[in-house]
Image: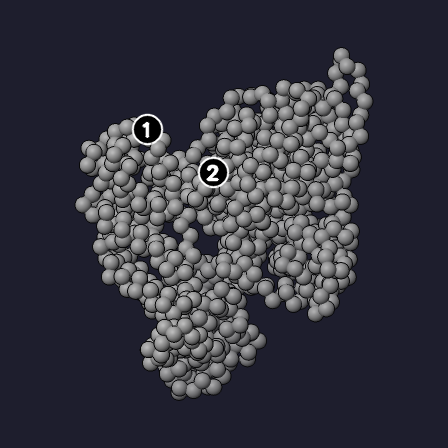
Amino acid sequence: MNHSTPTAEAVQPMMAALSAPQATPACAMGVAVCIHGHFYQPPRENPYLGAIERQPGAAPFHDWNERIHHECYRPNAFARILNDQGEVMDIVNNFAYISFNIGPTLMSWLEQYDPQTYQRIQEADRQSCDRLAGHGNAIAQVYNHIILPLANDRDKRTQVRWGKADFKARFGRDPEGIWLAETAVDYPTLEVLADEGFKFTILAPSQAQRCRPMVSDHDGDPDWHEVGGGQIDPTRPYRCYLSGINADGSRRHIDLFFYDGPISRDMGFNDVLGSSHHFAGRIGQAVRGDHRPNQLISVATDGETFGHHRHGAEKTLAYAVTKAFPQQGWTVSNYAHYLHCHPPTWEVILKPVTAWSCAHGVDRWQDDCGCGGGGGWHQRWRRPLRDTLDWLRDQLASLFEEIGSQYFSDAWATRDNYIHVIHHRSDAVIDDFFAAHQCRPLSERDRVDALRLLDMQHHALLMYTSCGWFFEELSRPEGTQILRYAARAIQLAGEVSGIELESEFVRRLSAAPSNVGEFQDGAGVYHQLVAPSQVGLEQVAAHYAMSSLFTTYRPEQRLYAYTIRQQDYQLQRMGPLSLAVGQLQITAEVTRDRTDVCFAVLHLGGWDFHCCVMPFRQRLAYRRAKDAVFAALAQASAAQTIVAINKAFGQALGNHTYSLQNLFVEERHRIMGLLSRETLQRLDQLYSQVYRDNYGLLRAFYRDGIAAPQELQVAAEVAIGHRALEGLRSLETETSDPAVSPVQRGAIYLGELEAIAHEASQFNCRLSLPTAAGILEPLIRRALWQVLQDPNPDTLGADVDWLCRLMGLSDRLGLGLSMDRAQELYWHHLNPWLQHVQTAPPHQATALLKPLVKLGRALSIDVDARLRVTNSLMMAQPQQLQRL
C-alpha cells in the first residue's frame, strides 16, 4: 500500500485534467465575449531581505499577498460550480477562459508560495492556445507597474523588455499583447510597444479621441467620428497608426481594444457579479442589434474583483464562461484570437496622455489633482515626491554609465538583459550573463560592484511603482515601499561609488508635505518608516547570533537573501546566562558581496540580550577575544561578561551593540513566543486547575440556565482549548509515519478529541485554536490521499468512517477549516474510481461505491449528479445505486 503524501509535482498532472476547456472553431462568427482580468499586487518585499514581512492588517494571514491569494488567485485556478445545495458540481480553471495579465512581481511570489496555482495558470494559457488556434489567454504587463508616459525613454524600454522577457520565461511563448499600468498611454509609449513587437493593448473608452473606417482605395477619405466622451464602439478592434514605415512599406501601427466601460464599472461597483444570470444578462445588453456578422463584447477589471473585492465572484465567473455564455450562443474568446480572426477595419486617434483611473491625464501620479483623495486630505506631496525620485534616477543613471563603462560593453543593454539574472540567480546564470556583457575579464571584486550597479538600477525602476502615488497619503504602505526601494538604490550607489546621496535626497523629500502630523513631510516619513528598515551585513550577523541561541543552524544556512557559512561557533550556558561566540562568512545572494565577521551575544534571561559584531581580521585576535568573554562568564557575572564583550567585540572598538529589538521582525516574534512559553504554560496549568476545581459548579450554572461567571467561563475555554491543542498535536505525531495508515494509528486520539469537542459544546466554549488548521488540514489531505490512491477493500468502510469523523471535528471544534484542497483531491479521483466500479462485479461495486458516495457528501461534492451521468453504471447497477 502506497501511503506517501502527494507533492505539488505529483498533483499537478491530475489538476490539469479538471474540466479542461474544449476546442473552439478556428474563427467562429457571431458574438464573442472576452473577460479580461488585470491581476496585480504591488511588490511588498523588504528590499534588503527579499521577503515580505508580516502585515498585521492582513490577519489572519501573514501578509496581503497571502490573503488575496487565498481569496482570489487560487479560487480562480480551482473555481467551483455549485448546485442549489452548495455542493460542488464542477471545478473550473477560470484562467483557461478569460484573458488575463499577472504582474511579473506577483508571478514571482506565486511561483514560490504556491507552485500548484502557478502551474495551473501556466496550464490555462496552454489550454487556451489549444482551444483558440495558438492564441493564449495570457498577455504581458509592464514589469513593475510604472506609469510609462511619465518615464523617460530608457526606462520605458527596459520596463517593456523586462515584462516581455518575464512573460516568455513563464509561458514559453512570445506575448501578443501587453497591459499598461493603469492603462496609462501616450504615443511615445505606443511607439515603444510597436518597437518591441507587441500587436495590441487594451484601453478605456474614455482614452479615444476620434475614429473612422480605415481608408481604402475605393472609399476615399471617410469622416472622423468624435468619441472623446467615451462613445467609441467597444465591439470592434481599432488600428492606431504611428510614425514611420515598416520594412515592407506599410505604415507602423499597433491595434487597440477598448473595453466596455459601463459593464466594467458595474462589475466593480454594482451587483452584476452577484450571479451568473445577472452577469450574462448585463453582457447581453451590450450586444449590438445591427446584424453585424461578428462583434466582441469585451470587459476589463482588476482580477482581484473575482473573489477578493467581490466574495464568491469567481464562482459566478466560472459558471458564466462554461455554461451561461455558451447557452446564449456566445463564443468565449480572447483579444489575440479575435484580432487574428477579425482584423481592424477602423482606425483611431487617442487623446494625448490618459489613464483609466484619472480624469486629469496622468496627474494622479504627479500632482494634487484630487483623484484618490479622501477625508479632506491633500496630495500636494505627489509632485515633490516625483521630482525627488527623478533627481535620484538621474544621479544613479550618471553613476551607472560612468562606473558601468568599466565593466560592461554596453551598460544599458546589460540592464535590459539583467532580467534573466533576476529570474534565476544561480552561479551558472551569472557566469553566462557576464560572459555576454563584460567588456573585459572581471575579478570577483569587480563582479560584486557590477552586480551592485545592476541591483541599484533594479531598485531605481521599482521605486516608480505606480501605487506609491495612487492613494491619498505618502506615509501609506505603498508610498513607504517605494521610498524603501529608493533607499536601497542609494545604499548600493554609496557602496559602489563612495558617493553619499541620502542627505540631498531627504532634503528634497522634505518638500513633500504629509497629511499626518507626526511625520510632517517626506523627510519625516523617511526617517521614521524607511530608515529603520535598512539592513546591512552586520545586522544580518547580529540576527544570526541572537537567533542561534534558540535555533540549531546548519554549517551553511540560507537566511532571507543571504547565505551564512559558520566558520566557528561555541555556546555555553551558566544558570540564567547564555553566551555564544562565533565567526561567520556572510554572502549577499543578489550582489555576491561577502564579508567575514565575528560576534558575541549574551542572553541574560527574559527579554535582555547584549550582542556585538565586528569585522573578522585575524584568527589570533578572534581567539583572544573569545577566550576573554568566556573567562568573564566563568565568574557567573553578567556585568563582567558585558564589559568583556564590549571591550573585545563592541563599543570599545567603535562597533554597534544589538538587542532583541534589532532582530528581523519574523524571528523577533518567534523568539518572543519562545520566551513567553514558560509563562503561558504556568497560566495554562492555573486555568486548568481552576476549571477542574469548579467543574461541578460550572455544570450547575449551565444546568439551571444561569450565566456562568466570566472567570469560570474563561478558565473553561482556556483549559479545554489547551487540551484540544495537545490532542491535535498527539494525533499529528501518532499519524506522521507515511508508511502507516493514519486510520490505524489515530483512532484513540480522534475519540479523545471528539470527547473534548462535546465538553466544549456543553459549556458554550469558544475555543482559540490558531494552530489547529495547520495540523488538521494536512492530516485530512494525507488520509484522503491514502484512501483514494490505494484503497484497501477490507478496511475501506472503516477508513472512510474515520476520515468523515476527522473532517467533522472542524465544525465541532469551530475551526472553520478549508476543505478546498481535499475537494480537489477527491474530484480528481472520482472519474477513475467510477470507471473501476463499472468493471467490478455487482457486490464489489456496491462495496466500493457506498464509501465513495459517503466521502463525497462529507466533502460537499455533488456525487449524485456525477453518478447520474454515468449511464452505463446506472444501467448496470440501478438497485445498488438507489440504496446508496
Is the residue 38 above or below the residue 546 in the image? Answer: above
Q: Nearer the viewer, residue 794 or 426?
A: 794
State the scheme by which the image is colored: one colour
- The residue under label 2 is 93
Image quadrant where residue 761 sits: bottom left
Q: Which of 626 and 661 is in front in this view?
A: 661
User: How many numbered marks does the figure carry?
Assistant: 2
Residue drawn 58% across and 45% down? 305
Is the residue 37 above or below the residue 678 in the image? Answer: above
- Describe residue 678's horizontal placement relative to residue 740 as left or right: right
- Describe residue 486's horizontal placement relative to residue 327 as left or right: right
Is the residue 44 above or below the residue 524 in the image? Answer: above
Q: Which amino acid does label 1 sit on?
A: Asn
Q: What residue type is labelled 2?
A: Asn
- The residue under label 1 is 871
Q: Which residue lies furthest to the top in this view?
A: 218
- Mark 1 or mark 2, which is nearer the start of the sequence? 2
Circle nearer the viewer, 2 or 1: 1
Q: Which of 412 and 447 is in front in this view?
A: 412
Residue drawn 27% across and 46% down? 787
Helix, strand or loop for disc 2: loop
Q: Quadrant of the N terminus?
A: top left
Image quadrant where residue 632 sits: bottom left
- Describe residue 780's horizontal placement relative to residue 216 as left or right: left
Residue 505: give x, y in percent of width and height: 72, 60
